Amino acid sequence: MALLQIAEPGQSSVPHDHNLAAGIDLGTTNSLVAAVKSGLAETLQDEQGVDILPSVVSYQKDAILVGNAAKAFSVNDPENTIVSVKRLIGRSLSDIRSKYPSLPYDFCGGENHPEINTRSGAINPVQASAEILKTLAARAEKVLGGELKGVVITVPAHFDDAQRQSTKDAAKLANVNVLRLLNEPTAAAVAYGLDTKHEGKQQGVIAVYDLGGGTFDISVLRLNKGVFEVLATGGDAALGGDDFDVTLVDHLIEQANLKRPLSRTLERQLSQQACKAKEQLSQQNSTDITLSFENGDQWQGTLTKETFNSLIASLVNKTLRACKRTLKDAEVSTEDVLEVIMVGGSTRVPLVREEVEKYFKKIPLTSIDPDKVVAVGAAIQADILAGNKPDSDMLLLDVTPLSLGLETMGGLVEKVIPRNTTIPVAKAQEFTTFKDGQTAMAVHVLQGERELVEDCRSLARFELRGIPAMTAGAAHIRVTFKVDADGLLQVSAMEKSTGVESSIEVKPSFGLEEQQIASMLQASMSNAKQDIEARMVKEQQVEAARVIESVQSAIAADGSLLNTDELNTINAAINALTQVIESNQADDIESAIETLNESTAIFAERRMDSSIKTALAGHSVDEV
Amino acid sequence: MNYFQLFGLDHQFDLDTTKLADVYQSLQKSAHPDRFANASSQDQLLAVQKSSMINDAYQTLKNPITRANYTLTLRGTEMPNEQASFGDTSFLMHQMELREMLSEIKDSNDIESAISSASQTLAIEYDNLFKVMQTQINENTPESNLLACENLRKLKFYQKLNIELERLEDSLLDD
């Protein structure tokens, strides 16, 4: 029997205009933007024909520079030139100070909202990241010839909630619509997954080994008929190719009989030489190193590949231990792994490739440039999310990289959502009061794997007040954790007998407040008030158009789920919205959207249930 | 709608996990928020809710321990409170022996093989106990369900031991 065709809910059955979308790899050292052009995902170049944009932002007297232009100032004007801002985003001041003690910046701002003093005033890491995003989005709009409907921005898989939220805030500040935050290893898997068919076998477990300048991610995915299901992800937030350089510098200091402290110039010379030597040893078996001292003396030495390998062996081994742990979390063995994908510039180091090959017992895939593969994957996902491929079978099921929990008595952490749980996810847990007559409860949200509060990352604190006085242990407080498809957390708490509720979008602890973003936006616009209003009207108009289109196509596809009365109500609401859409009154449009949404709430629910049933039915047919 | 119904499965403990995974992916293809990236905020919110529910259902049914817990709860079997005292003293004595086995690992000459032999011991005992519980759940009488609850609780002790062993492994083998 031929099966009837049913359109995807929310997608119209008529062909769409092509929506412009891009994938952005917002990297520590370098950033890239890519897009799907006539069916092929590729990185986009600037006017000079260069696709890599150094992640450097420099605040000069008359301009904010980004990329190579900014990089030129990194040595001579370090205080006003922010390099590797990704290391700072979503972090506390003490966190930054302990991890990167020798940064040449003048930090200001609070513990949870660190800022850098520049000649353009105090700059938040979110603002600096926004400059990079703005530059890449502008490049994409220029190359693609139109306004971007949205972008997919990649983040390291192990990024915590504050880092993800801050990345999204940066996009907001850059006036870029985020379709999805995508984990970097997952993006790489997409880039390869649609490219290689494994001799027709589009199924199997793949591992993505992602060693960048400052971070290491390992993800294990199962590929099945277009579905990329992340089974587990792990890694090390503070292990990367830069650590190879550091080890090498220490070795050179020893060889040259130097004693720390050394001058800044010499330190910089050492790390440049180390980085260069590392790169050369990817091609040859030995390299010469020359150090020039301030007194005119020189030191010359030779570094062999063998020595280099022995220096970095323990670091490489550390990544393999993380692989082992992640495979265990994923409940697969190295024999189950069909392919290993290499991502990140540091996977060019031969020892890394050799050891990964030895561990997984197969030659890792390197056919797509490890520096570009993430952006390419993000572009493919962006193209689909923008609605350009309604027939696409592809679906990404990602996970939370770190466990989420709450502080309980005695400074212990009770996990509510364990790591490697597929998102989106909603989980509730019940807690009770500790003392007789207790009327308030402090909710402290934490992220991490350790048992003690002090060893985990504190994400937010809030209070549930107005709990009726009861004996200890009598109140039932239900705390709900929700993680959306971007990996962002929302927590709410409710006392069950009275319904007293309190909720928080986990944010104020580290990220920016909504208001701060608004005022930063305002400050960045020349004609602030009018611009903001115009933008709000535009946002509402876009949403209105989206809602109308989505309701109309839903009626076209599933109108049979409505009775005449319901259909009339919905049509009336559509007409009402159509009438105010050109009014330039954001509030009016918003409330008309609200009315239309209310009139379609039940319809939306019915459609969703019916599409789930269809999915199930299609399945039973497959099985027979 | 319970989780078995959501996945179009018969309400029984033993299930075909390959089919479960296949159905899961089809369901997510129709409900995941990525399918609604262009839809109205209302549809997006609904998609997040449905998709979360499907994820929760899948996780619950995929893992045999949570599936057992869910099956017994659906049957209305009273779950003993986690803090309630445990009657089976010989089981508790044995648990203490197993804990001792774990704490002795760090003094062993060959830590790696000590870990792997401990892990094997735990796995064998877990499997045996699991089979007993499985039979009891499948028998599905009020008495067998109560016994299954008791064994489920015991299995959770083994889960905790396994977590402990993993921690031990990480701390002993890391640097």
Image: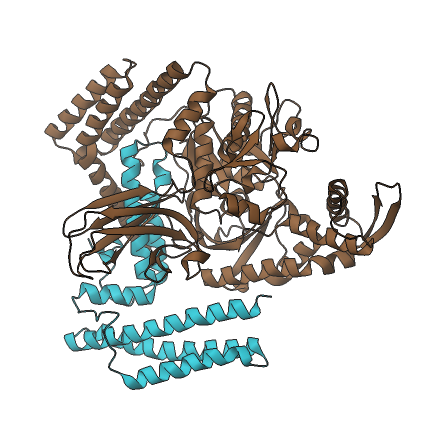
Q: Position of residue A335 (x, y in %)?
A: 54, 64
In this view, the residue farthest toward the right is A297
Q: Position of residue A423 (x, y in %)?
A: 37, 48
At 26% from the left and 52% from the top, the residue drawn is A441
Q: Is residue A3 above or below residue B57?
A: above
Quadrant including the N terminus of chain A: top left
At 37% from the left and 46% from the top, the residue drawn is A460
Q: Is residue A55 above or below residue A97?
A: above
**Who is closer to the viewer here, A227 or A150?**
A150
At 17% from the left and 69% from the top, the residue drawn is B77
**Who is closer to the viewer here, A557 or A518?**
A518
Q: Quadrant of residue A135?
A: top right
Q: Position of residue A30 (x, y in %)?
A: 61, 37
Quadrant including the C terminus of chain A: bottom left
Q: How is the rendered protein coloured?
A: by chain
**Who is closer to the viewer here, A386 or A610?**
A386
Q: Colour of chain A?
A: brown
Q: Colour of chain B?
A: cyan
Q: Is residue A383 visible?
A: no
Q: Position of residue A332 (x, y in %)?
A: 48, 63
Q: Is residue A443 visible?
A: yes
